[in-house]
Amino acid sequence: MNLKRYRVGKKLKLKDISTDDTDKLDRDEIEAETAEIGEQLTSLQERLYAEGKQSLLLILQARDAGGKDGTVKHVFEPINPQGVVITSFKVPTETDLKHDFLWRVHPHAPAAGMMAVFNRSHYEDVLVTRVHGLIDDETAKTRFKHIRHFEELLASRGTRVLKVYLHISPEEQRQRLQDRLDDPSKHWKFNPGDLKERALWDDYTRAYQDALTATSTDEAPWYVVPADHKWYRNRVISELLLETLQDMNPQYPKSEYDLTNMAVGEL
Amino acid sequence: MNLKRYRVGKKLKLKDISTDDTDKLDRDEIEAETAEIGEQLTSLQERLYAEGKQSLLLILQARDAGGKDGTVKHVFEPINPQGVVITSFKVPTETDLKHDFLWRVHPHAPAAGMMAVFNRSHYEDVLVTRVHGLIDDETAKTRFKHIRHFEELLASRGTRVLKVYLHISPEEQRQRLQDRLDDPSKHWKFNPGDLKERALWDDYTRAYQDALTATSTDEAPWYVVPADHKWYRNRVISELLLETLQDMNPQYPKSEYDLTNMAVGEL
C-alpha cells in the first residue's frame, strides 16, 4: 500500500481529498489483511519494549465522530496493553491554562520502549481555540513553531512521531451523530455541543489545513486518512504503524549470561 | 546598581571576571540595602500572585559549594512561601532518562502568578554530562537549541526567565568544602564526589562558557554573579529580581463588586 499519497506536504486542500477512498479494495480482504498486520504489530511492539531505546507516538485528530476512539480500539486491540499508553486530552483544566499549552502534554510523551497514543492533543490548541477566536493568527503561528520544536525534541530522544487526521465527510458525520441518538449503547457519546462545532465545518477545515501544513515535518509527518469506511481507516493506520516500526527495526538485546552449567548457590 | 555588566553576551571568559567583586561597597551598607529590597520583593510578589497572569523563573547554577542553597535561603526568605516553588534537581532517575532531557523539568515550570526557582536545572544535562564525556559536542549543540526553544515557549506564556551562574574562585570553593568538614552542622553537605568534580575545574569552566553563551537570549538572559562574598551575591540577585519584577509591573485586579449597601440574604 502506497501511504505517501496520504502524507501532508506544503499544501493541503481537504475538499480535494476523498473521504471514502478504499483503494478499490474489498472489505473482507482488507479486514483479513488488517488482522494479519495486527499480528506483526504485536511482535514488533514486543521488540520495541525489549530493546527499550526507541518509542512511538501516534497523534490522532479528527472532527467529532471522526473515529478516534474506534481507531484506538481496533488498531491497538492486538497489542500488549502493557506496552501502550493511551492519553485522551479533554478540555484544559484551570491549572493547565496557567501554563504554556504544551505543559499538560509533555508528561505524557512515551518513555523509551513504549508506544503512546494521543487521542486529541496539543493540536486542539491551534484548532478549537482558533475557530472560536480565542487566539489570533499571530499566536497560532507562534504555536505552530513551538509544536515543531517540541516534536523535534521528542524525535531527538528516539521517539517517532506519527500524526493522523481522520478525514470524514459531513454526511458521514451526520450519520454517525444520528446513530449515537438512535442506539442506546452509543447515546452516552452524543454531545449536543458537537452540533455547534459541526455548524463551523468550514472554519475547522481552514484551521486543520493551516495547522497540518505548518507542522508536517520529516520528524513528525501528518497523514490525512480517508475515514468514512472504518475498515479501510483501520487498515491504513495499521500499515502506517507497521511500516514505521519496521523502519525503526527494534532489536532484542543480546544475552550476556549463560546458565548452562550453573550450580545452586553459585552466582 | 548596574546589572548589565554581569549579563552574558556572545563571548564569555570566566577567568577574566572577578569572583570577589563587591563594587567597592561596604558590607553593612549592602546588607541593609538587601533587606530593603527584600521588602519591595515581598510586595511585588503579592501583586504578581494577585494578578495571576505572569510568572518568574530563576534558574541557579554553580559549581559545588557555589552558594545555590544559601542564595535560595537568604534571597527568598522575606517572600511569602505560598507564592514561590523551589525545585532542586538531583541526578536523573531511570524514568527521567527514558525521556528527553526536558521531560523532568517542564512540569516544574511556574504557573501564572507564581515565582519558581530551579536549584540546578536542565543545564546539568549540558554541563556534568559534557565534562564526563556522556554526550558529544554535536549533542550538546542540539541540546542548546532545545533549551533555547523551551525557554522561548515559557516566555511566550508570560514567564520571565532569569538565569544566574554563581561565580566563585577555586580558593573560595576549597575553603567552603573545608568548612563543611570542620563544622558538624555543615558536615552533611560534604560529598567526597565534589573533590572529583573540583579536579575537573577547567573542563567545567569550558562547559559553562559554552552553555552560557549559547543560551543567553533576550527571553532568558544569563548573569554571571560574583559569589565569593555571599552578602554581595545576595544583593545582586535580589536587585536582579527587583528590577525584573518592576519591569513586569504586575497589577492588582480591579474590584468588580460593591457591597456597601448589601443586605443579608441578597446576592
Image (spheres, coloured by chain):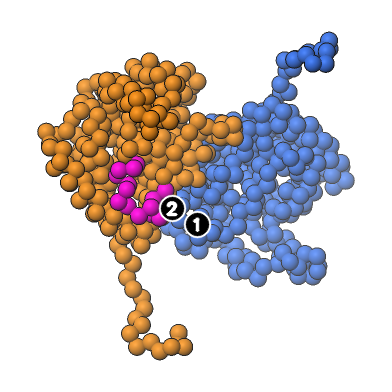
Chain colours: A orange, B blue
The structure residue drawn at horizontal position 35% and vertical position 55%, both measured from the top left corner, is A80
Whether residue A43 sits left or right of residue B21 in the image: it is left
Residue B203, percent across and down? 54, 61
Q: Amino acid at mark 1?
A: Thr
Question: Which residue has dot 2 on it?
Answer: A111
Q: Which residues are magenta?
A: A72-85
Chain bearing mark 2: A
In this view, B144 is above or below B175: above
Residue A32, percent across and down? 17, 46
In this view, B33 is above or below A263: above
The structure residue drawn at horizontal position 24% and vertical position 29%, both measured from the top left corner, is A228
Residue B1, percent across and down? 75, 36
The C terminus of chain B lies in quadrant? top right
In this view, the residue in front, B154 or B75, is: B154
**Magenta span includes A77:** yes
Chain bearing mark 1: B
Please identify the quarter of the rendering in which residue A44 is found.
bottom left
Whether residue B42 sits left or right of residue A185 in the image: it is right
**Magenta span includes A254:** no
Which class describes the residues within 10 Å of circle 1: few (<14), some (14-19), or many (20+)? few
Which labelled disc corresponds to residue B95? 1
Residue furthest out toward the front:
A184
In this view, the residue in front, A58 or B1, is: A58
